[in-house]
Image (cartoon, rainbow, N blue to C red):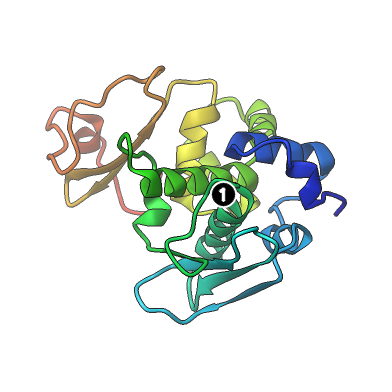
């Protein structure tokens, strides 16, 4: 790899950072070698997290002259990769301030945070770190190239791309809904109730049933005879 941390000094946003990384690494392979990239960008080590109740962490100093990324032992490879990307985001985004003693400690909920209330600085940092991780592991230009060769959206394609990019099916579903040219929504259903919903709110503005509410009886979910594990 050729990209250096000094190459990223002109921006502090997740989108700007990823754009510069891709500019310097136009042939970045898939799945993106996130551990190699972190070490290239001056992370000293990726080690096991020993603190209970957290998925990942970052040890750094005030000037970000060094950093050690911590990942919970035993997590799946897609979760490990996303956690490393998340903590790398904390390391590279200059205005991210550790909780205390130079430590970021991130819970499972932090790694799922997609929005933050006005004035909630900590939640905003988690949102930005998640956005960085998603963008670097699933670079939009590479996703759009994949969509060109498979223009008709399908769950099978989501699963295929999740494997190709080395991410979870859920992470790929979020990116698929955001960047595909079709207006899409992914709704996670458990026990007949709506769970998480992923869609571009400008192109697919609403979903009738709110989170925790039963899936409407007239929907395709009930009429199609769906079976677990079969898209």
Above or below residue 102? Residue 30 is above
Q: Is residue 142 left or right of residue 222?
A: right
Query: Could you say where residue 5 lies in the image, as x and y percent from the top left?
Result: 77, 51
Tell me the quarter of the image containing the N terminus.
Answer: bottom right
Which residue appears farthest toward the front when viewing the image? 62
Tell me the quarter of the image containing the C terminus.
Answer: top left
Q: Is residue 52 visible?
A: yes
Q: Is residue 153 visible?
A: no
Residue at image position (15%, 44%) is 212
Residue 139, image quadrant: top right
Residue at image position (79%, 48%) is 6
The tally of labels here is 1
Q: Assess disc 1: are there few (<14), some (14-19) or many (≥20) residues with their C-alpha within 10 Å of its C-alpha.
A: many
Q: Is residue 63 left or right of residue 209?
A: right
Query: Could you say where residue 12 lies in the image, as x and y percent from the top left?
Result: 62, 39
Query: Could you say where residue 105 lies in the image, as x and y percent from the top left?
Result: 44, 66
The front one of 46 and 222 is: 46
Residue at image position (74%, 64%) is 39
Query: Could you say where residue 54 lies in the image, as x and y percent from the top left?
Result: 39, 70
Above or below residue 99? Residue 176 is above
Residue 100, image quadrant: bottom left
Q: Is residue 36 left or right of residue 57?
A: right
Which residue appears farthest toward the bottom when viewing the image? 50
Callout 1: helix, strand or loop? helix
Residue 37, image quadrant: bottom right
For mark 1, what is the residue?
A: 133
The front one of 44 and 229 is: 44
Residue at image position (74%, 43%) is 8
């Amino acid at each position: 790899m050729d990209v250096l941390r000094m190459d990223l000094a002109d921006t502090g946003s997740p989108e700007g950072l990823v754009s510069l990384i891709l500019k310097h690494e136009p042939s970045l392979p898939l799945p993106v070698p996130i551990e190699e990239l972190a070490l290239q960008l001056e992370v000293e080590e990726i080690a096991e997290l020993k603190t209970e109740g957290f998925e990942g962490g970052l040890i750094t100093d005030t000037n970000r002259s060094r950093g050690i990324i911590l990942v919970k032992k035993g997590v799946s490879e897609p979760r490990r990769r996303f956690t490393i990307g998340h903590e790398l985001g904390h390391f590279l985004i200059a205005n991210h301030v550790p909780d205390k003693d130079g430590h970021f400690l991130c819970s499972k909920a932090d790694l799922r945070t997609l929005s933050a209330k006005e004035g909630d600085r900590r939640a905003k940092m988690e949102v930005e770190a998640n956005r960085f991780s998603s963008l670097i592991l699933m670079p939009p230009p590479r996703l759009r190239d994949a969509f060109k060769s498979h223009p008709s959206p399908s769950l099978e394609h989501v699963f295929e791309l999740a494997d190709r990019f080395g991410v979870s099916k859920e992470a790929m579903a979020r990116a698929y809904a955001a960047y595909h040219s079709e207006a899409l929504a992914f709704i996670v259903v458990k026990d007949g109730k709506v769970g998480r919903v992923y869609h571009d709110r400008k192109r697919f503005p609403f979903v009738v049933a709110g989170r925790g509410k039963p899936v409407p009886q007239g929907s395709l979910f009930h009429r199609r005879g769906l079976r677990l594990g079969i898209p």
